[in-house]
């Protein structure tokens, strides 16, 4: 007679060790799980389909203008609380579509800490894009530059689509402005203001951002 298979431990030795070494991560995970039912309800109420494998640390702010398009791919990670990242987001993640025909399309395995993505016309973000803490991405000037036009219609600022390619990494405290395309696998240095297109596979930084050098090796970001 063979003996029954041993019952696996509830927690592996590695998990216990990590919990002792990084107790704040345990708190973050417990908070995430506690938030999950409310987060799913919130997304349903604002009209954004829930994706597989999402991880929300704190509740983001969703401002979806019906019937605009706002989609987020599978595997998204949105960090909205100061406890969830040592770079401490200044406010929750904000995803906004400001007009009925606006489009905000975000690909799979997207990550962002705090910050704002605001689409008045169209913002398209590829797969495996990481956006650093407190970055703003917008396709609009919000307000007209001409004072007379501002008096007539203060919200009629110029707009132009933004496109961010696959595997782009945007550092913290960046500003990505209207009409910009950032090529696949490029890196935007922290604190940069991007007002012109960035080609694929380069490092760009500064105000305004300019190409610093090409990346020596371009490969898709692998998440652990």
Image (spheres, rainbow, N blue to C red):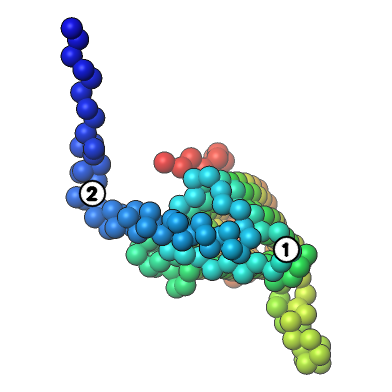
Question: Mark 1, residues whose alpha carbon is within 10 Å: few (<14), some, or many (≥20)?
Answer: many
Residue 19 shows which numbered tag?
Answer: 2
Left or right of residue 178, residue 174 in this image: left
Helix, strand or loop at label 1? It is loop
Asked whether residue 172 appears in the rendered view, the answer is no
Q: Residue at x 24, y 46 (%)?
A: 18
Q: Quadrant of the C terminus?
A: top left
Helix, strand or loop under label 2: helix
Q: Is residue 146 left or right of residue 53?
A: right
Q: Which percent across, then down, holds residue 191?
A: 52, 68
Determine the image quadrant of residue 9: top left
Q: Quadrant of residue 206?
A: bottom right
Please tell me which residue is depicted at 47% across the width and 64% down the height of the picture.
59
How far is mark 1 from mark 2, CA to CA? Answer: 42 Å
Seen in the image, is 154 located left or right of residue 165?
A: right
Q: Confirm whether residue 5 shows in the render.
A: yes
Quarter holding the N terminus is top left
- Relative to 106, residue 67 above or below: below
Q: Which disc number belongs to residue 54?
A: none
Classify 10 Å Cα crowding around label 2: few (below 14), some (14-19), many (20 and above).
some
Residue 2 versus residue 47 in the image, above or below = above
Q: Nearer the viewer, mark 1 or mark 2?
A: 1
User: Which residue is pictured at 53% across the width and 63% down the height?
Assistant: 42
Q: Give percent across and percent down for residue 77.
A: 48, 53
Q: Of callouts 1 and 2, which one flags the residue occurring earlier in the amino acid sequence? A: 2
Position of residue 176 measured from the top left corner of the image (x, y, whole percent) = 62, 66
Label 1–label 2 contact, CB within 8 A? no
Tell me residue 39's x, y (percent): 48, 60
**Tally of numbered tags:** 2
In the picture of the structure, the residue carrying the numbered disc 1 is 68
Residue closest to the eye, 72 or 186? 72
């Amino acid at each position: 007679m063979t003996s029954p298979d041993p019952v696996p431990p509830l927690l592996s030795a590695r998990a216990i060790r990590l919990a002792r070494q990084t107790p704040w991560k345990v708190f973050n995970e417990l908070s995430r799980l506690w938030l999950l039912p409310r987060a799913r309800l919130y997304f349903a109420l604002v009209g954004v389909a829930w994706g597989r494998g999402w991880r929300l640390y704190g509740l983001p702010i969703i401002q979806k203008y019906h019937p605009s398009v706002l989609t987020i791919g599978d595997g998204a990670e949105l960090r909205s609380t100061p406890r969830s990242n040592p770079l401490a987001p200044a406010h929750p993640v904000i995803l906004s579509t400001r007009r009925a025909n606006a489009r905000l399309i975000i690909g799979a395995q997207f990550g962002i800490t705090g910050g704002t993505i605001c689409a008045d016309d169209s913002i398209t973000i590829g797969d495996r894009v990481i956006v650093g803490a407190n970055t703003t991405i917008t396709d609009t000037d919000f307000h007209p530059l001409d004072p007379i036009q501002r008096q007539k219609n203060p919200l009629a600022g110029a707009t132009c689509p933004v496109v961010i390619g696959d595997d782009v990494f945007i550092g913290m405290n960046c500003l990505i402005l209207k009409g910009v395309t950032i090529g696949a696998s490029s890196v935007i240095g922290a604190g940069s203001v991007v007002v012109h297109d960035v080609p694929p596979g380069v490092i760009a930084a500064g105000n305004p951002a300019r190409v610093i050098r090409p990346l020596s090796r371009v490969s898709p970001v692998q998440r652990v």
